[in-house]
Image (spheres, grey):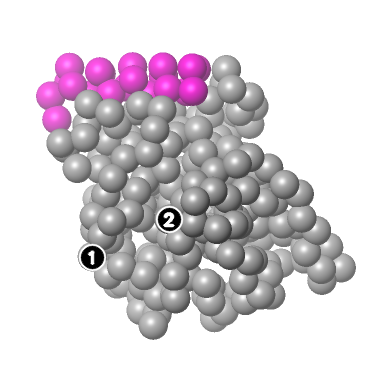
Amino acid sequence: MPEDVSDRFRVARNVMVETQLRQRGIRDERVLSAMETVPRHEFIDPGYWGDAYADHPLPIASGQTVSQPYIVAAMVEALALRAEDKVLEVGTGTGYEAAVLARIAGQVYTIERHTGLARQANEILSRLGYKNVVVAVGDGSKGLPEQAPFDAIIVAAAAVRIPDALVAQLAEGGNMVIPVGPPDVQTLQLVRKLHGEPRITQLDACRFVPLIDETRFFES
């Protein structure tokens, strides 16, 4: 990529972080740094590069979307991640959110039901050098029990109710962020597992594609 184009994207990321994130209440400097570093444009079709750092979601293949930057930042911040954490992401999409997570946490597992999306995300993450992300194809509502427990779980698709399998795979004291509700509008919920039971805090209103019901790993 020509240096002037790269510089232009870098400036756009800086503006995104200041105007869309910091000014709207995102305070975790690790999240802000990750969002300022990860090249969102690399995870979307070049036809949308002009909107790569705009304050709205963007369409991707298989009828899915990549969430607006603020929602990504708000969800990741709510997890209160530590450098040693093992994270499960449900709904890989383009791989952008996994890249943000990988900048903060120690290990990220991400699962996507659409094979084409998962393959493309795996290729992008590998090309950009993210070695602490494992991409799988499968039913995200069932999680990845063979890799559990997870210190944190983030769900990028809306569930009618919180899947029991994900609560079971969340470590004691761990956090999960998940949109819950009907297709037209949902609420982000923060689920903290204490004494084996989920404690739920309501966060922001949101709108995500639905969480839908096979699991296969890509070779690194």
Q: Which mark is residue 209?
A: 2
Local SS, label 2: loop
Q: Give the x, y percent position of residue 24.
A: 59, 22
Q: Is residue 85 above or below residue 8?
A: below
**Horizontally, is 159 left or right of 110 in the view?**
right
Could you say where residue 19 lies in the image, as x and y percent from the top left? 49, 17
Q: Characterize the local packing of mark 1: few (<14), some (14-19) or many (20 or more) Cα atoms within 10 angstroms.
A: some
Mark 1–mark 2 distance (CA, rounded to whole Å): 17 Å
Magenta segment range? 1-20
For label 2, count other residues whose C-alpha is less than 10 Å away and answer few (under 14), some (14-19) or many (20+).
some
Q: Nearer the viewer, residue 134 or 70?
A: 70
Q: Residue at x 30, y 63 (%)?
A: 118
Main SS, magenta residues? helix
Left or right? Give the position of 184 relative to 219: right
Which numbered tag is attached to residue 206? none
Q: Amino acid at mark 2?
A: Val
How far from the left and from the top, in percent, is residue 71? Answer: 51, 39
Q: Residue furthest right?
A: 195
- Which quadrant holds residue 7? top left
- Measured along the vertical axis of the image, is residue 200 above or below residue 35? below
Q: Quadrant of the C terminus?
A: bottom left
Give the residue pinned by disc 1.
116
Q: Nearer the viewer, mark 1 or mark 2?
A: 2
Residue under the point 19% across and 42% down: 45
